[in-house]
Image (cartoon, grey):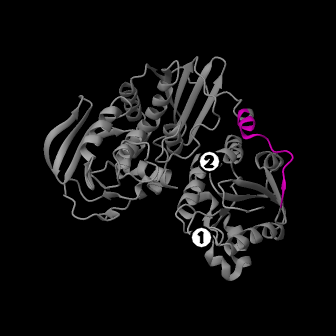
Amino acid sequence: MSTDGAGATFQHGACIYDSDRQFLETAVPFLAEGLALGEPALVVTTPANLELISAALGERAGDVDYAESAFFGRRPPQRVAAFFRYWRTRAAAGRGASREHPGGASRVRILAEPIWAGRSAREVAAWTRMESALNVALASTSISMICPYDARTLGGDILADAPCTHPALITRGRSSPSAQYIDPAVFARSRDAGPLADPPADAAAFAFDGDLRALRRFITDRAAEYGLDGDRADMLVLAVSEVGAYLKRQPPGGAAVRTWERPGAIVCDFRQPGGSIADPFLGLRPAELEPGDGDGLWLTNQICDWMEIRSGTDGCAIQLQVPSRHDQEMVAQPGIRYTT
Amino acid sequence: MTSSYAVYDDGVLRITSTTDPPGLAIAGEIDESTYPGLLSALQRGAGGRAEIHFSLGGLKYCDLAGLRAIVCATGADGCEGSFNGRHGGRRSVVLHEVPPQLITVLRIVGWDSTPGLTLDLRGRGVPPRSVGNVQGSAVV
C-alpha cells in the first residue's frame, strides 16, 4: 500500500488470507514500514492475531498500539468513531510526526480486522456497510488502513463483499486497485433497501409537530414505562431528541413517532411522510467542535445499538434501538455501552 | 456559588451571572429553541474574560449543539465559527456540577479533552480551587 505523502487521503485495502503466514506477509511489512517512518501504528484484531504480530515484530512490537477487535467499537458507528479518535489523537497532535513531516500530522497506519464470527445477518450487513462507508466517513483523515479477512473462517458472502467495499486489495504486502470496488453511496443504498421493522399495533404513538420539549416528555414517560432509569433513560431521551431536532429542520418537519419493546430492546420509530434523506452516511461522520450536518444524529448513532435510515418516494424514516431493562451488560460492566 | 443577576430567562432556560467564581449558572433546557438565548448569554458573560466558570447543576437537558457552544467558550481550534471566534481569544473554562449524562456525552464526542476545558468533578456545591485538566477524584 502506498503511503506517499502526509496529505489527508484515506487509504483502505482488504487483505484476504488463508494462513498465518499470509496474514503476516501483509501485516508485518505494513506495520514495520510505518514504524520506520515514525508513523503511529495500531493493530485491531483477534487475540490470536495480536500474538502472531507481536511475535513477528520482535523488539519493534512495543512501539505498536493494540486493541482487541471486540473492544474497539462495539457497533459500526462506534468503530468509525474509534478509528477517527485514534487518528485525531495520534496524528493531529503531532506526536506521529514523520521524518518527512516533522512537527506536524503524519499518516497513521491501522490494521483493522473486524469480528464476523457469531454475528447475525443483520449485523454482518451493518459491518459490511461500514467497511464501505469508511471510505467516506474517514475521507478527511490521513489513515492508511488494511482490513484482513480470514478465508479459513469467513463465509463466501463476506469474502465476496471485501473487494466491493475496499478500493484496494493487498496481497503479500503489495497493493493493487480493486476492480470490483463499488461507490460507497451506491453500495450503501443497495444495502439499505430492506424495510424497517413495522411498529406493532399496540406501539405507543406520538405526533411530533416540532415541539422538542413535548417529544422529550413523551420519551421520558415511555422510558419510565419500559423500566429504564438513570443513564439509560437520559441517553435515550438525548438520542430521540436529536432525531426530532434533525427531522424538524427538514421539510416538511414533524414526524409520527412510535415506540415499543421487543425482547432485549426498546425501539423508537420516526416516520416523516413527504420527507427525504439523501445522504447515506448521515450520522456517521464524527462530530467535531466545528459544526457539521448530522452531528446530532452522529450522537444518536453513538448512543444506540441501532440507527437505521430509510428514504423513499413516500417519505423517510429513522428507527433506533437501545437495550431494554433486561440488558445485563451495563450491570456487569457499568459504562460499557457508551465508552467502548 | 454566589449568584448576582439573571442574564437570560425565557422560562425554559435560565442563566444567571455568578461572581464567586466568576461565570454563569445555566439551568433548564438547551435545545434549538433556547440556543440563541444561550449564545447571547455566553457572549455577554464570557467576553473579555480569561477564565470563566459554568455551573451546570440545574441543567436538565442539553443537546449537542448547546454543549458545543459551552465548550467553545474555550476558543479552542475548531471553534472559529462559534460566538467566541467573533469575540476572539482563548480562555480557561471550568465546568462545575456537570450532570452525569453530559459527562458521558463529553466523553463520547471527545470534547472532555478540549484544550482549556476543565471538569470539576468534585461534589456538588464545592467551590473550585485550581485549574487542572480534571479536578476531583471521580473517574471521567
| Amino acid type of the residue tagged 1 in the rendering | Pro
Q: Which residue is mark 1?
A: A102
Element assignment for label 2: helix
- Provide residue A335's location: percent of width, then percent of height: 45, 54
Camera sees residue A127? no
- Residue A76 image label: 2
Q: Position of residue A223 (x, y in %)?
A: 41, 34
Q: Is residue B53 left or right of residue B107?
A: left
The answer to whether residue A210 is left or right of residue A181 is left
Nearer the observer, B93 or A338: B93
Compared to residue B112, the image places residue A280 above or below, namely above
Report the amino acid beneath label 2: Pro
Q: Which residues are magenta?
A: A175-189
N-term mark: 1 or 2: 2
Q: Chain of mark 2?
A: A
For the residue pair A236 and A264, the one nearer the viewer reads as A236
In magenta stretch: residue A176: yes
Q: Is residue B17 magenta?
A: no
Question: What secondary structure is found at the residue carrying circle 1?
Answer: loop
Quarter holding residue A136: top right
